[in-house]
Amino acid sequence: DIQMTQSPSTLSASVGDRVTITCRASQSISSWLAWYQQKPGKAPKLLIYKASSLESGVPSRFSGSGSGTEFTLTISSLQPDDFATYYCQQYLKWTFGQGTKVEIK
Amino acid sequence: EVQLVESGGGLVQPGRSLRLSCAASGFTFDDYAMHWVRQAPGKGLEWVSGISWNSGSIGYADSVKGRFTISRDNAKNSLYLQMNSLRAEDTALYYCAKDKGGAATHAFDIWGQGTMVTVSS
Protein backbone atom coordinates (compact mmCIF):
# COMPACT_ATOMS: atom_id res chain seq x y z
CA ASP A 1 0.00 0.00 0.00
CA ILE A 2 1.10 3.55 -0.69
CA GLN A 3 1.38 5.58 2.51
CA MET A 4 0.94 9.36 2.51
CA THR A 5 2.60 11.40 5.26
CA GLN A 6 1.72 15.05 5.76
CA SER A 7 3.68 17.60 7.75
CA PRO A 8 3.10 19.40 9.93
CA SER A 9 0.03 17.91 11.63
CA THR A 10 -0.91 21.33 12.97
CA LEU A 11 0.17 24.73 11.75
CA SER A 12 -0.43 28.05 13.54
CA ALA A 13 -0.43 31.07 11.25
CA SER A 14 -1.73 34.60 10.90
CA VAL A 15 -3.81 36.24 8.20
CA GLY A 16 -1.48 37.26 5.40
CA ASP A 17 1.12 34.58 6.10
CA ARG A 18 2.54 32.34 3.41
CA VAL A 19 1.76 28.76 4.39
CA THR A 20 3.30 25.55 3.06
CA ILE A 21 2.12 22.00 3.76
CA THR A 22 4.16 18.99 2.68
CA CYS A 23 2.97 15.55 1.63
CA ARG A 24 5.32 12.63 1.10
CA ALA A 25 4.41 9.35 -0.64
CA SER A 26 6.01 6.05 0.32
CA GLN A 27 6.62 5.34 -3.38
CA SER A 28 6.45 7.31 -6.58
CA ILE A 29 2.95 8.40 -7.60
CA SER A 30 4.05 10.55 -10.55
CA SER A 31 1.67 13.55 -10.37
CA TRP A 32 -1.41 11.63 -9.22
CA LEU A 33 -1.95 13.82 -6.18
CA ALA A 34 -4.82 15.99 -5.01
CA TRP A 35 -5.31 18.44 -2.16
CA TYR A 36 -8.59 18.97 -0.31
CA GLN A 37 -9.81 21.50 2.23
CA GLN A 38 -12.27 20.48 4.93
CA LYS A 39 -14.01 22.76 7.39
CA PRO A 40 -15.75 21.45 10.54
CA GLY A 41 -19.06 19.79 9.76
CA LYS A 42 -18.55 20.12 6.00
CA ALA A 43 -17.57 17.79 3.19
CA PRO A 44 -14.06 18.04 1.74
CA LYS A 45 -13.53 20.43 -1.16
CA LEU A 46 -11.12 19.74 -4.02
CA LEU A 47 -8.45 22.44 -4.35
CA ILE A 48 -5.68 20.96 -6.51
CA TYR A 49 -5.49 17.89 -8.75
CA LYS A 50 -2.68 16.33 -10.75
CA ALA A 51 -0.30 17.88 -8.21
CA SER A 52 -0.48 21.42 -9.57
CA SER A 53 -3.77 21.97 -11.45
CA LEU A 54 -6.09 24.43 -9.74
CA GLU A 55 -9.70 23.26 -9.54
CA SER A 56 -12.22 25.61 -11.11
CA GLY A 57 -13.42 28.30 -8.72
CA VAL A 58 -10.55 27.89 -6.25
CA PRO A 59 -8.70 31.13 -5.45
CA SER A 60 -5.32 31.56 -7.09
CA ARG A 61 -3.60 31.98 -3.71
CA PHE A 62 -3.67 28.18 -3.55
CA SER A 63 -0.98 26.36 -5.51
CA GLY A 64 0.48 22.89 -5.63
CA SER A 65 3.83 21.53 -6.74
CA GLY A 66 5.90 18.38 -6.78
CA SER A 67 6.07 15.00 -8.43
CA GLY A 68 7.22 11.51 -7.59
CA THR A 69 7.18 11.35 -3.80
CA GLU A 70 7.37 14.96 -2.56
CA PHE A 71 4.52 17.44 -2.87
CA THR A 72 3.60 20.79 -1.41
CA LEU A 73 0.47 22.88 -1.04
CA THR A 74 1.12 26.60 -0.69
CA ILE A 75 -1.28 29.33 0.35
CA SER A 76 0.41 32.56 -0.73
CA SER A 77 -1.46 34.88 1.64
CA LEU A 78 -3.61 33.20 4.28
CA GLN A 79 -7.18 34.51 4.46
CA PRO A 80 -9.71 34.11 7.32
CA ASP A 81 -11.68 31.61 5.21
CA ASP A 82 -8.60 29.37 4.87
CA PHE A 83 -8.47 28.17 8.48
CA ALA A 84 -9.37 24.52 7.99
CA THR A 85 -7.90 21.03 7.72
CA TYR A 86 -6.07 20.08 4.54
CA TYR A 87 -5.63 16.57 3.18
CA CYS A 88 -3.46 15.25 0.40
CA GLN A 89 -4.62 12.20 -1.55
CA GLN A 90 -2.82 9.94 -3.98
CA TYR A 91 -5.20 8.53 -6.54
CA LEU A 92 -3.33 5.55 -7.81
CA LYS A 93 -5.04 3.75 -4.94
CA TRP A 94 -6.76 6.70 -3.25
CA THR A 95 -4.89 6.89 0.07
CA PHE A 96 -5.29 10.11 2.03
CA GLY A 97 -2.72 11.80 4.23
CA GLN A 98 -3.56 12.21 7.91
CA GLY A 99 -4.41 15.89 7.54
CA THR A 100 -2.91 19.25 8.48
CA LYS A 101 -4.96 21.60 10.64
CA VAL A 102 -4.29 25.27 9.94
CA GLU A 103 -5.09 27.27 13.08
CA ILE A 104 -5.17 30.95 13.92
CA LYS A 105 -1.97 32.06 15.62
CA GLU B 1 -26.92 22.32 -9.61
CA VAL B 2 -24.51 19.43 -9.27
CA GLN B 3 -25.51 17.48 -6.18
CA LEU B 4 -24.92 14.22 -4.35
CA VAL B 5 -27.30 13.20 -1.57
CA GLU B 6 -26.53 10.22 0.62
CA SER B 7 -29.07 8.26 2.64
CA GLY B 8 -29.45 4.99 4.50
CA GLY B 9 -27.25 5.58 7.52
CA GLY B 10 -28.26 4.86 11.07
CA LEU B 11 -27.59 2.85 14.21
CA VAL B 12 -26.95 -0.85 13.61
CA GLN B 13 -25.74 -3.71 15.79
CA PRO B 14 -22.38 -5.37 15.17
CA GLY B 15 -22.63 -8.15 12.62
CA ARG B 16 -25.71 -6.70 10.93
CA SER B 17 -26.06 -5.12 7.50
CA LEU B 18 -26.88 -1.71 6.10
CA ARG B 19 -27.26 -0.33 2.57
CA LEU B 20 -26.26 3.21 1.74
CA SER B 21 -27.55 5.09 -1.28
CA CYS B 22 -26.32 8.18 -3.08
CA ALA B 23 -28.60 10.10 -5.46
CA ALA B 24 -26.82 12.16 -8.10
CA SER B 25 -28.19 15.13 -10.02
CA GLY B 26 -26.96 17.98 -12.18
CA PHE B 27 -24.43 16.00 -14.22
CA THR B 28 -24.33 13.02 -16.58
CA PHE B 29 -23.99 10.30 -13.96
CA ASP B 30 -23.00 7.48 -16.30
CA ASP B 31 -19.98 9.43 -17.60
CA TYR B 32 -18.17 9.32 -14.28
CA ALA B 33 -16.68 6.93 -11.77
CA MET B 34 -17.93 7.21 -8.21
CA HIS B 35 -16.51 6.51 -4.77
CA TRP B 36 -17.38 6.08 -1.11
CA VAL B 37 -15.12 7.76 1.46
CA ARG B 38 -15.61 7.60 5.22
CA GLN B 39 -14.52 9.64 8.19
CA ALA B 40 -14.65 8.28 11.72
CA PRO B 41 -15.57 10.86 14.38
CA GLY B 42 -12.65 13.23 14.89
CA LYS B 43 -10.47 11.33 12.42
CA GLY B 44 -9.18 11.71 8.89
CA LEU B 45 -10.53 10.60 5.53
CA GLU B 46 -10.44 6.96 4.42
CA TRP B 47 -11.28 5.81 0.90
CA VAL B 48 -13.68 2.86 1.07
CA SER B 49 -14.57 1.83 -2.45
CA GLY B 50 -14.74 3.04 -6.05
CA ILE B 51 -16.56 2.00 -9.22
CA SER B 52 -15.98 3.00 -12.82
CA TRP B 53 -18.67 4.51 -15.04
CA ASN B 54 -19.79 1.13 -16.42
CA SER B 55 -19.12 -0.95 -13.27
CA GLY B 56 -16.31 -2.65 -15.15
CA SER B 57 -13.66 -1.67 -12.60
CA ILE B 58 -14.30 -1.90 -8.86
CA GLY B 59 -11.94 -1.50 -5.92
CA TYR B 60 -12.11 -1.77 -2.15
CA ALA B 61 -9.99 -0.77 0.79
CA ASP B 62 -8.47 -3.77 2.55
CA SER B 63 -10.43 -2.84 5.68
CA VAL B 64 -13.79 -3.56 3.97
CA LYS B 65 -12.89 -6.11 1.29
CA GLY B 66 -15.18 -9.12 1.45
CA ARG B 67 -17.76 -7.31 3.60
CA PHE B 68 -18.81 -4.28 1.52
CA THR B 69 -20.13 -4.24 -2.04
CA ILE B 70 -20.33 -1.14 -4.22
CA SER B 71 -22.78 -0.92 -7.10
CA ARG B 72 -24.47 1.65 -9.29
CA ASP B 73 -27.65 2.00 -11.32
CA ASN B 74 -27.02 4.47 -14.13
CA ALA B 75 -30.69 4.47 -15.11
CA LYS B 76 -31.53 5.76 -11.64
CA ASN B 77 -28.47 8.03 -11.26
CA SER B 78 -27.68 6.21 -8.05
CA LEU B 79 -24.71 4.73 -6.23
CA TYR B 80 -24.96 2.12 -3.50
CA LEU B 81 -22.86 0.57 -0.76
CA GLN B 82 -24.01 -2.71 0.73
CA MET B 83 -22.30 -3.14 4.09
CA ASN B 84 -22.38 -6.57 5.72
CA SER B 85 -20.82 -7.95 8.90
CA LEU B 86 -20.52 -4.46 10.32
CA ARG B 87 -17.99 -3.77 13.05
CA ALA B 88 -17.61 -1.01 15.60
CA GLU B 89 -14.66 0.33 13.60
CA ASP B 90 -16.97 0.94 10.62
CA THR B 91 -18.63 3.75 12.60
CA ALA B 92 -18.14 6.85 10.48
CA LEU B 93 -19.69 9.52 8.30
CA TYR B 94 -19.89 8.02 4.82
CA TYR B 95 -19.46 10.38 1.88
CA CYS B 96 -20.35 9.74 -1.73
CA ALA B 97 -17.88 11.42 -4.11
CA LYS B 98 -17.73 11.94 -7.87
CA ASP B 99 -14.54 11.16 -9.77
CA LYS B 100 -13.34 13.74 -12.29
CA GLY B 101 -13.13 10.94 -14.88
CA GLY B 102 -14.88 7.77 -15.92
CA ALA B 103 -12.29 5.17 -15.01
CA ALA B 104 -11.92 5.82 -11.26
CA THR B 105 -8.43 7.20 -11.74
CA HIS B 106 -8.86 10.87 -10.89
CA ALA B 107 -9.45 13.21 -7.98
CA PHE B 108 -12.88 13.67 -6.39
CA ASP B 109 -14.47 16.94 -7.43
CA ILE B 110 -17.98 16.70 -5.98
CA TRP B 111 -18.89 15.38 -2.53
CA GLY B 112 -22.17 14.79 -0.76
CA GLN B 113 -22.81 15.89 2.81
CA GLY B 114 -22.51 12.36 4.16
CA THR B 115 -24.66 9.86 6.01
CA MET B 116 -23.71 8.69 9.51
CA VAL B 117 -23.31 5.00 10.28
CA THR B 118 -23.02 3.98 13.93
CA VAL B 119 -22.24 0.36 14.76
CA SER B 120 -23.02 -0.38 18.38
CA SER B 121 -24.91 -2.84 20.52
Image: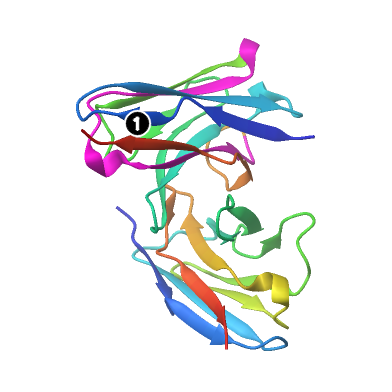
Q: Residue at x 65, y 26 (%)?
A: B24
Residue B62, quarter of the rendered image: top left
Location of the N terminus of chain B (image quadrant): top right
Q: Quadrant of residue B65?
A: top left
Foreground of the two, A25 or B62 = B62
Foreground pick, A24 / A42: A42
- Write the residue at 45% across / 48% down: A92
**Residue positioned 63% across, 37% down in the render:** B101
Residue A26 is covered by the magenta coloring = no
Judge whether B24 appears above or below B76 on screen.
Answer: below
**Label 1 crowd bin: few (<14), some (14–19), many (20+), radius 10 Å:** few
Q: Which residues are magenta?
A: B75-101
The kind of residue on which mark 1 rests is: Leu
Kindly state the secondary structure of the residue where label 1 is placed. Answer: strand
Looking at the picture, the colour scheme in use is rainbow
Horizontal arrangement in the rendering, residue B99 relative to residue A93 (left or right): right
Q: Which residue is mark 1?
A: B11
The answer to whether residue B97 of the structure is visible from this angle is yes
- List x then y, in percent, for residue A37: 60, 61
The answer to whether A104 is drawn above or below residue A93 in the figure is below
User: Residue A63, can we see it?
Assistant: no
Q: Is residue A104 left or right of residue A27?
A: right
Across and down, in percent, residue A54 comes to: 72, 61
Res A15 quadrant in image: bottom right
Q: Position of residue A98 (x, y in %)?
A: 40, 64
- Please identify the quadrant where the C terminus of chain B is shown: top left
Asked if residue B92 lies in the magenta stretch, the reply is yes
Picture coordinates of residue B60, whole percent (x, y)? 35, 35
Chain letter for mark 1, please: B
| Residue placed furthest toward the top | B75
Q: Is residue B106 left or right of residue A97?
A: right
